[in-house]
Amino acid sequence: MGVSYQLMLPHMLLTAAATAALVSHRIAETVCEDRCGDVVIPYPFGTTTGCFLDDNFFITCKKSSNPPQPFLRKSNILVTNISINDGRLHVMSTAGRDCYREGGESDPISTRRMFSLSEFTISSTENMFTVIGCDSYAYIEGYIRNRLYTSGCMSFCDKLDDVENGTCAGTGCCQIEIPKGLKQINYSAHSFDKHESVLEFNPCTFAFVVEKTKFNFSSSYIWNITEEVHTVLDWTVTDHGECENGSSSSMNYACKENAKCIVPEDGSPGYRCQCQPGYGGNPYLPNGCEDIDECNDSRLHNCTHKCENQVGNYTCSCRKGYHGDGRKDGTGCTLNQLSVIKVALGVGIFFVVLLVSSSWLYLVLKRRKLMKLKQKFFQQNGGLLLQQQLSKRSTSSETAKIFAAEELKTATNNYDESRIIGRGGFGTVYKGFLADNRPVAIKKSKIIDKSQTEQFVNEVVVLSQINHRNVVRLLGCCLETEVPLLVYEFVNNGTLFEHIHNKDKAPTISWENRLRIAAETAGVLSYLHSAAATPIIHRDVKSTNILLDHNFTAKVSDFGASKLVPIDETQLSTMVQGTLGYLDPEYLHTSQLTEKSDVYSFGVVLAELLTGKKALLFERPEEQRSLVKYFVTSLKESCLFEILENHIVNDGNEEQLKEVAELAKICLNVKGEERPTMREVAMELDGLRMMHKHSWVNAELNPEETERLIYDNSDVYKYGDGSNTTAGYDSLKDHVLEVLDDGR
């Protein structure tokens, strides 16, 4: 019923605890089932012939239920728990009720209950007889030592507001105690006036015997409760000899070896069995009481120092250097006087040695731990492989240096916030000063893919060999930290992005400087794509990665996302990386990285140099948010000079601006195959610069001879003298780079 269900969980926990206590000992005969569903069935109870002591202890296990359910004998009394130690049987009993309809007509659901349980008695300490209703009384009848017992309880209330939850003092709920030894009970519920005298009609009177801890009265019970409630029975063994005269050797006597019998306090006939002190198990089974090793559980023994198990008992003793009986309730264990002196002296010496050595040990361990950590990071980051590769180039003055972690920590004043000169998606850049006061830029990466260690080493080696005046030179790295630190030369005039988009700086960078910066950047990318032994795709070309020195000379930086391309491969499948606004749409769609991806990004930089506008700016109108879309659309509509930066346009460079704009447009083709190579772009820009410097050439050369071949995907330009030449990299011809065979 609702009143009992809400307290089902504590009962289930109690059952589980009892079950756990019996698991370590035998609880039933070997050939007998000791469980019905979730309920443990210990002997003298049993479910089959020969497995129970007598008919009083027969349990019917209905296996048709799910899970199977045990019932007392052949009744409908459901058993929920059987306790051997205290002789209690937890069951579900049925409530009696007396119900009426409005108008005084009797309700057919009214019942009178009988609870006949032979020799089992109703527990007087665990149960209460309970009556619920507002015009109600009920009787309980039974037998105590073959004498009839009758008692009752009355409950009244005019309206439900008078009823208090949790109180059974006669208003809506009444309870009386159960006398000792009561059995074979029946109870009946009644109404004084068919519930019509109550202001608020409530139909029923309910009467039942319920376990105290499983019942908490609620005013809602006046209207309805379900029939079944928790009840506790006391059971004893009868017709199996007398307790005083019993002997474990008697076949009829219920208590077996190492067990004793106990007479119930309520005077009920029969007895119960318990294992003797020092034994545990089932006292009703032959040899069911087994010796308990009290020494395994501190709660079971009284020893202070040493415990030794005995059959049915245990003994206590003291450790060496102590004397006494070793018991908590006795003299305990006292340290011998000589031992006290020895212990005090030993403790004193120990603490002196500990005090002196602990500090030394702490420093040694801390230093060793730090060294091991550095060594771990060094190996993890490919330090040994890098040393091996650099040793092959030990004769080169340009070989990258492997810096110590402490050296870079000192150079950046422990990576002080004031030393930060840039932040990006791959890490933070600090300005530092080496021991010789040389300024450097130290890049502290956020993450590194541990599976790419060998490729990272290869990249460091390759980049350290790039001796191009327009590339920020990699001086070395530090591998003693969790993520590698890269050390670059320091470029002191900021980024191209700052000079283009800062209103104060933009006018200071003329068109001639912008064109030269574009040509220098294109030359670097052409060099990376074509002149290196293993081509390098930068993968993050943008104005923030082009640094400027005091002469506005371009320095391409940030190769954190770069990829080395094996010679026999024209494209790589990679996870897409880059910066929105500069990212190649074909690469974004296919994840196929090619050299043409850098061409697209460079085209965005050219558009920035021409217009002074950012690659993405969400504050602009929708049609102008993407610089690429805005730039290409303006060219198609012949509106180029409306979007160019005002101060870069003069009478002498309009044609040159148109040529650069057309070059940017072709670089921004959606299809990579329709874009030029960086070598072609660099040659085009160099050609434009040279013709601007030597404008007298334009008047003498045949226009057909100066026609650009970029749109025919040619690798060279034709000049008036008929010679073929590349984009001015003669100084780099000897810089052939060696790379690892498996470099990325």
Image: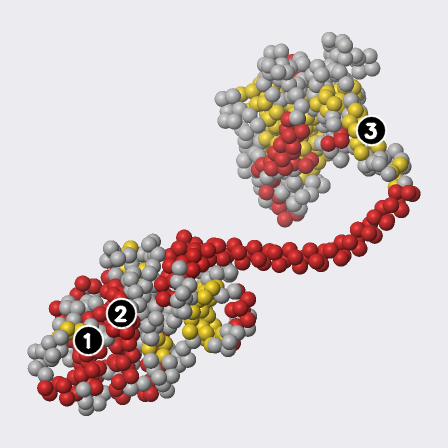
What residue is drawn where x is 22% and y is 70%?
A: 679
Contact, CB < 8 Å: mark 1 with mark 3? Answer: no
Name above or below for residue 169 compared with residue 422.
above
Horizontal relation, residue 701 to residue 578: left or right:
left
* Mark found first going from the N terminus, 3 or 2: 3
User: Dividing the picture into quarters, in which one does residue 195 lie?
Assistant: top right
- Given the current orientation, which residue lies at the most extreme top position? 251
Q: What percent of the width, then of the height, locates residue 154?
A: 70, 36
Residue holding disc 1: 684
Residue holding disc 2: 733
User: Dividing the picture into quarters, in which one does residue 654 lie?
Assistant: bottom left
- Given the current orientation, which residue lies at the most extreme bottom position? 651
**What is the spatial separation of the Cα atoms under label 2 and label 1, in whole angstroms?**
20 Å
Q: How is the image coloured?
A: secondary structure
Residue holding disc 3: 315
- Residue 584 in sight in this render: no
**What is the spatial separation of the Cα atoms under label 1 and label 3, in whole angstroms?**
102 Å
- Disc 2 crowd, CA 10 A, few/some/many (<14, 14-19, 20+): few
- Given the current orientation, which residue lies at the most extreme right position? 337
Secondary structure of the residue carrying numbered label 2: loop
Name above or below for residue 519 compared with residue 95.
below
Mark nearest the camera among 2 and 1 is: 2
